[in-house]
Amino acid sequence: MGFHLVNWMKDIVGGTLLVAGTSIGAGMLALPVVTAAGGFIPAFFVYLLCWLFMTCTGLLFLELCLKLPPDANIITMASTYLGRFGKVFAWALYLFLFYSLSVAYISGGGGLLQDFLGIDLVYCQWIFVLVLGSCVYVGARMVDRLNLALMAGLILTYLAFVIFGLPQVEFSRLEPANWDLALFALPVIFTAFSYQGIIPSLTTYFKRDAKRVRIAIIAGTSVAFFIYLLWEFLILGIIPVEGLLQAKELGQTAVAPLKDHVSASSITTIGQAFAFFAISTSFLGVTLGLFDFLADGLSMPKKGGRKVLLALFTFIPPLMISLVNPSVFIVALVFAGGIGCALLLGLLPALMAWVSRYRNEGHGGPLQLRGGKIVLVLLFLFVLFELIMEIGIDAFQ
């Protein structure tokens, strides 16, 4: 009994870290920048709202996975429940989301390399893509090895930033609250809580044990929530709101203004290192997924000249956009979350669950999210509200 309990707990911890690790990435570097105008307390409630929403849609994905054969991905789900239109819709959203994220990471990674190397930004963006892109081209094994080292650096620099940053926090900077502006951060926070793409793999890993997957989803998103909240507390408590608003205008990450507002240069260095690790791990994961997605969708073998062509399709479009507009980090994340995540990871699972539950009688099964039609309608309305926020952001830019 004890042996099985230990193994069960190990699996839960592993699944929880997988969900949390997939969520936590470069998106958190933009969170304090886009929430600064609203203030810390309003940001807390917006985080809470997005955590609840993205946890619910994750449970819907689990429900749909359990009704389909093992290893069915989001494209398969969309095709099954929404037909050809759903498949094309999901395909287009996947490409839009992955390319938008790639643009953001190339822009942010190039900017950080420029801080370290002190050379022209164009060269830094090329170096960033060529070095990390080469690892993606070699394959998943190479990415796994490099990602392990980068994740170790990410964890160590985050802990170091917390330890050295806490004494620098000024609580008076956390008091202002502007509730009207807080909701404009929704698109980027959506991106920061994105993890749903791994649910099919997680379901297979847990041998379709719904209880364990459900615990991993709830615990994993909760870990991400608390890590984001602590990060928000530190950055908004250390950097004046004016510095963060300026960073937003320049399309910079939240660590860029540190050098102007902290006396200890070590904190700036740790923050920049953390940012680089976060962007690099996210870039590897996103572009590896995009590379494999294109190979599968275009039915192109990852060999010889076809593999080179796939690499060009994966890296050249986002690199060109980033070269044309080097300050696109925040804008790309807003588009990724406001459109890609909202529709692919918010609207789509709610729509598929509705069809599965109330139109396809042959697709019955245990519900993973209670509340019936009322909850699904609330999810629809929240996506609609978020899209309105996206339009509002575009209008004010």
Image (tube, rainbow, N blue to C red):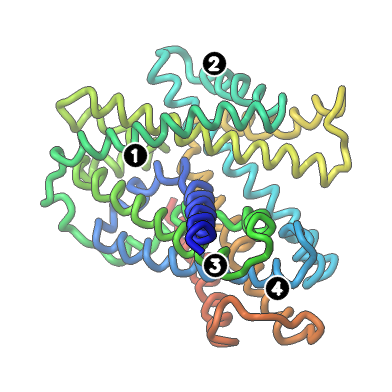
Q: Earlier in the sequence, mark 4 or mark 3?
A: 3
Q: Determine whether label 2 and label 1 are within 8 Å by CB.
A: no
Left or right of 223 in this view: 18: right
Which of the two discs, 2 and 3, sits closer to the camera? 3
**Which secondary structure lies at badge 4?**
helix
Q: Position of residue 91 (x, y in %)?
A: 75, 54
- SS of the residue under disc 3: helix
Are dots 4 and 3 in contact, CB under 8 Å? no
- Which mark is in front, 2 or 1? 1
User: 356 left or right of 277?
Assistant: right
Element type at mark 1: loop
| Quarter where residue 58 is shown | bottom right
Q: Which residue is mark 4?
A: 352
Which residue is denoted by mark 3 in the rendering?
A: 214
Task: Give the mark, 3 or 1, whose residue is nearer the N terminus.
Answer: 3
Q: Considering only order in the chain, which callout, 1 or 2, is on the residue closer to the N terminus? A: 2
Secondary structure of the residue carrying tag 2 is helix
Q: Amino acid at mark 2?
A: Tyr
> How much space separates mark 2 and mark 1, taking CA atoms?
23 Å
Identified by mark 1, the residue type is Ala
Q: Which mark is residue 123?
A: 2
Residue at the spot of label 1: 254
Answer yes or no: is residue 342 visible: yes
